[in-house]
């Protein structure tokens, strides 16, 4: 038996990778200026704000943070304000710019939102208010709407 090695041709792996490594609560806050007191029937105006950001941790590892802010008001009076920053560590490699933007704007928030939704529900309940279940969010539709609005805006002219 001879010990011969034949060279193996290696090619760069160009397979796109998007892999979840961890999900964690990065930050949260809850404010109820007057406590759970309410005048009459519980029917507040609820506003929901969603924001997504991403940052390089190292190499192909990215942290994506979904910030969900919910406020409940009765007239001008704020009943509660809750903000949750739900984060995830994702390996993202061999993604083109368009695929990377879509992953950060749709795929990652879609994974993170159920965790943020549960955290918000718990915070609101622990604050003495009725349970708040946020409706599902279609991040693909939000991304498409934002892209359509961006395409309709005239490009800035440089003088």
Image: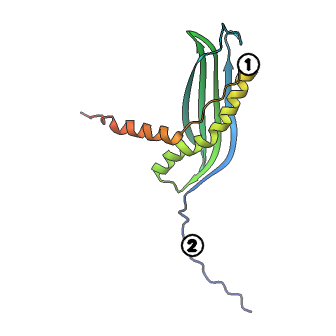
Residue 152: x and y in percent read: 33, 36
Local packing at callout 1 (Cα closer than 10 Å; few below 14, some 14-19, many 20+) is some
Q: Nearer the viewer, mark 2 or mark 1?
A: 1
Mark number displayed over residue 119: none
Q: Residue at x 56, y 26 (%)?
A: 48
User: Which is more toward the observer, 18 or 135?
Assistant: 135
- Let me know if residue 134 appears in the view: yes
Q: How is the image coloured?
A: rainbow
Residue that extends furthest to the top in the rendered view of this protein: 39
Q: Rounded to the nearest whole Å, what is the CA distance between mark 2 and mark 1? A: 58 Å
Circles 2 and 1 in contact, beta carbons < 8 Å: no
Question: Does residue 99 appear left or right of residue 5 in this picture?
Answer: left
User: Which is more toward the observer, 51 or 93?
Assistant: 51
User: Which comes sooner in the sequence, label 2 or label 1?
Assistant: 2
The residue wearing badge 2 is 10
Residue that extends furthest to the front in the rendered view of this protein: 41
Element under label 1?
loop
Q: Residue at x 27, y 34 (%)?
A: 157
Residue that extends furthest to the bottom in the rendered view of this protein: 1
User: Which is more toward the observer, 127 or 18?
Assistant: 127
- Let me know if residue 59 appears in the view: no
Q: Residue at x 73, y 27 (%)?
A: 122
Mark number displayed over residue 127: 1
Residue 144: x and y in percent read: 44, 41
Residue 97: x and y in percent read: 46, 50
Q: Is residue 104 above or below residue 133?
A: below
Question: In which quadrant of the rendered view does residue 109 lie?
Answer: top right
Image quarter in which the C terminus is found: top left
Residue 77: x and y in percent read: 59, 9
Q: Residue at x 73, y 23 (%)?
A: 125
């Amino acid at each position: 038996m001879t010990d011969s090695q034949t060279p193996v041709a290696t090619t760069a792996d160009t397979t796109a990778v998007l892999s979840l490594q961890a999900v964690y609560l990065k930050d949260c806050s809850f404010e109820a200026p007057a406590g759970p007191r309410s005048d009459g029937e519980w029917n507040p105006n609820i506003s929901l704000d969603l924001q997504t950001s991403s940052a390089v941790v190292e190499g192909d590892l990215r942290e994506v943070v979904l910030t969900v802010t919910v406020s409940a008001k009765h007239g001008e009076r704020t009943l509660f304000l809750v903000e949750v920053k739900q984060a995830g560590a994702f390996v993202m490699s061999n993604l083109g710019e368009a695929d990377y933007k879509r992953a950060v704007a749709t795929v990652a928030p879609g994974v993170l939102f159920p965790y943020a939704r549960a955290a918000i529900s718990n915070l609101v309940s622990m604050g003495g208010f009725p349970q708040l279940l946020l409706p599902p969010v279609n991040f693909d539709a939000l991304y498409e709407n934002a892209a359509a609005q961006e395409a309709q805006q005239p490009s800035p002219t440089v003088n």
